[in-house]
Every structure is written in C-alpha cells, then in structure tokens.
Amino acid sequence: MAEEQPLVINHIDYSLLPNEETYNSQNSPTPTPPILYDSPLTPSVRKSLKIILTCSWINCLLIFIPFGYLAHIYKWGDTWTFVLNFLAILPLSKLYDFATVDASLRVGQSIGCLLNATFGNAVELIVSIIALTKGEIRVVQASLLGAIISNLLLILGMSFVIGGFLHHQQTFNQIIAQTSSGLMTLACISLIIPAAFNFAVNGNTFNDSGDIKQLLDLSHGSALVLLIIYILYIYFQLKTHSNLYQIEEEDDDPQLSLSIVLLLFVIVTFIAAFSAEYLVDSIKGLVESSGLSKTFIGLILLPIIGNAAEFTTAINAAARNKMSFAITIAAGSSMQIALFLTPFLVILGWIIGQDLTLYFQSFETVVLFISVIITNYLILDGKSNWFEGAMLLAAYIIISWAFFLYPDEIVA
C-alpha cells in the first residue's frame, strides 16, 4: 500500500496577483475625467454679471455708489455724503462675501476657511485703515469694538430668534463654541488689561507723552501676542482639528470662473476704498450737524456696513437648522476682528506713526466684557432657543441706547 503523501501548500507570491487598483483599471469602464471649473461649461461674462448682480436682494443698493461719489464731489453736505456712501458700501460687503464663498468652493474647505478668515472682514479693514491714516483714532476703536459687539449680540441673537421660532430648539458643535468663547475671553482680557493699567498708573487720564508711551508699548506687545494666537488658531482649524469644522460642508459648485472671481475682488476693493474714504471724511461734519457722537457712529452705525454679509448668511443658516454654521459666522467673525484685525491695525499704526492702542475707555471695556460673558454663558451648553436670542437682542438694544447718550467730550 502506497504511503499517503502529506498535503503541501506551495508558497503563493501575492505580488504576482493583481492589486485592487489594477483590477479596477482592467475591469471597470474608463473613468470620467474631472470637470474643471474653468471648462467650456463656465458661464460667459454676461451670465457671470447676472449671477453677481442677482446673488442677493441687497445688491439693489449698488445704485447709491455713483450718488455717493456725486455727493462728495459736488458738496451736497456731510449728512448726505455719509448716508449715500453708507448705503453704497452695504452691497459691497455682500459681494465680498459672495466672491469669497465662490473662491473657497474650488480650493477645498481647509484653504477656503483661510480665505474666509482673510476676506470675511475686508470692508471693516478698508474703512479702519482709511480712518487710521486720517488720524480718526476714536472712529477706528469704536468701529472695532462695535463690530465685535454686533456679531456677538445682534447677529447671534437674531440667529437664535429665527432658528428658535422655526425649529423650537437647535443644537450646535459645542467644541467650536467653547473654542470661540475661550478666544473671545482672551481678546477681552487684552483690552481690559490696558484700561486697568492706565487707571492704576494715571487715574484714567493722560498727563504727558510718557503715559501714552507706556500704553503704546503695552499695546504693541499685546498685539504681537494676539497675532501669534490667531496664527495658532488657524493651524488648529486647518490642520490638527480640521474635522471639527467640516461637519456642515456644503456640496455646491462654484458659479463663476476663477478669473471673474479675482476681477470681482479687485473691482469691489477699488470701489469700497473710494466710498469708505468719502464716508470717513464726512463723519466730522455729520457729528457737528446731527449731534451724534463719533463713538455712536463708529460703534453702532459703521459695524452695520461690515456685518451686512454675516447678518444675512448667519440668519439663513439658522433658518436651515445649521446653527453650528451660524455660530461659526457670528462668533468666528468677532474672534477674527479681536485677534487679527485689531492687533493688525495697532501694528499698522505703529508703522505709520498713528498712536492706536488697545486702551479703551472704562465704559467701553465694561460693555465688551458684559457682551462676551453673556454670549459665553448662552452658547456653552451647545443648545439655543428663541428666548436666548431675545436676551442677546435686549442687551444690544440697551448698549446701543447707552452709546447714543454717550458724549464725546469725556473721551480722552
């Protein structure tokens, strides 16, 4: 009887087997090449213009751009010049937002977040730079503070109210809310410390150039620290924790070609620069003729210009039950102003010889502190409803009325 041979399994060389990529390439149909955004399907210039002009109802205010120029050239009065250029800048802010969103769709969300961070507050930056070069320090400080408060109380409050009425109670990413709250608290501290320092050293007054030099040195050092924190936050958002900021990514495609988007950025920046210059030039005459203070104009009126895009976008997001996106817009915009725009302008003033500091009047510092505290308290639980929005709006109305009565004469 023949001896039974053992079963031998020969070694299999898996390198000779087709891998998944080879198998798919041999057994699958030829893949469709990716569609480039600047392909023959790209809209024509005429259609692109139509898309731009109809992207928002607020674009009907573009008609005020030539009237704002005429009011400045033919001396229609500072009040008319301010009002007409004020109305002209509103749609320019929305066009900035539209161009930024369209550009971010073609580069991925990570770089898109960086674009939004860079250009989201472009109008505030243009107005503030022009006011800074003209020495309107109070207007710059008030507009920066007003933009932060407007985002935290007005825009976020309206988002809570609209979203709460439509969806009863909404939830949002608690980690994003906590991160924004912590950064806003840090920014608030950076403004409280110069006010406390000045009060402790000088009794809340300036007596000589040495006092200003101390505050300037403190402000310049603090501004550099805030800019570093902002860069670290961008790294946190784009690299180490980018997954937290992708939970509500939209699947929309760009509506314009890249060349049209870049051209739109250039044109809007050029027009906004002129309108902003005419607007700033008319503020002094408006104060004298209307009785309004520079603080009220800068803190309440000017933020409406820069926050027009955030206002409509955040409310639309809340109405679609995307409250995390609304929180990112409102709190994120405030954070960008506090951590990037404000220290950037302080450093720019240092370079061009304008004494812009992080020192705000005690009343203004208290108002900012209250705004940050109430906002942090309402968003830390990760839930929102319409009544919480009503509380934020009530705080904004009280603050607005207080600054309407706040005289410029007591400002140092």
Image (cartoon, rainbow, N blue to C red):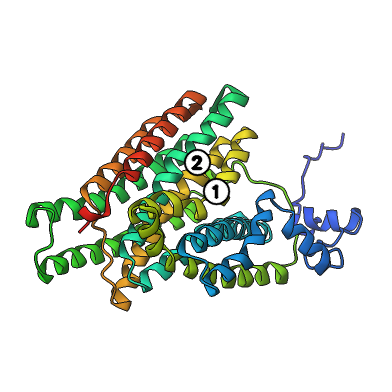
Label 2 residue SS: helix
Picture residue at 56% right of the left edge, 60% below the top: 84
Q: Quadrant of the N terminus?
A: top right
Q: Choose the circle earlier in sequence order: 1 or 2.
A: 2
Label 1 residue SS: helix
Q: Is residue 328 left or right of residue 3?
A: left
Image quadrant of residue 32?
bottom right
218 vs 266, nearest the viewer: 266
Q: Is residue 43 left or right of residue 311?
A: right
Picture residue at 13% right of the left edge, 54% below the top: 204
Residue 170 % position (x, y) = 55, 27
Image quadrant of residue 290?
bottom left
Q: Is residue 248 left or right of residue 32?
A: left
Task: Name the residue at the bottom extreme.
Answer: 352
Specify few, some or many for label 2: CA neighbours under 10 Å numbering under 14, 14-19, or 20 or more: many
- Tell me if residue 99 can be seen: no
List the residue tagged with mark 2. Answer: 155
Distance in Å between CA atoms under marks 1 and 2: 8 Å
Residue 176 vertical position relative to residue 77 in the rendered view, above or below: above
Residue 189 vertical position relative to residue 50 in the rendered view, above or below: above
- Tell me if residue 366 can be seen: yes
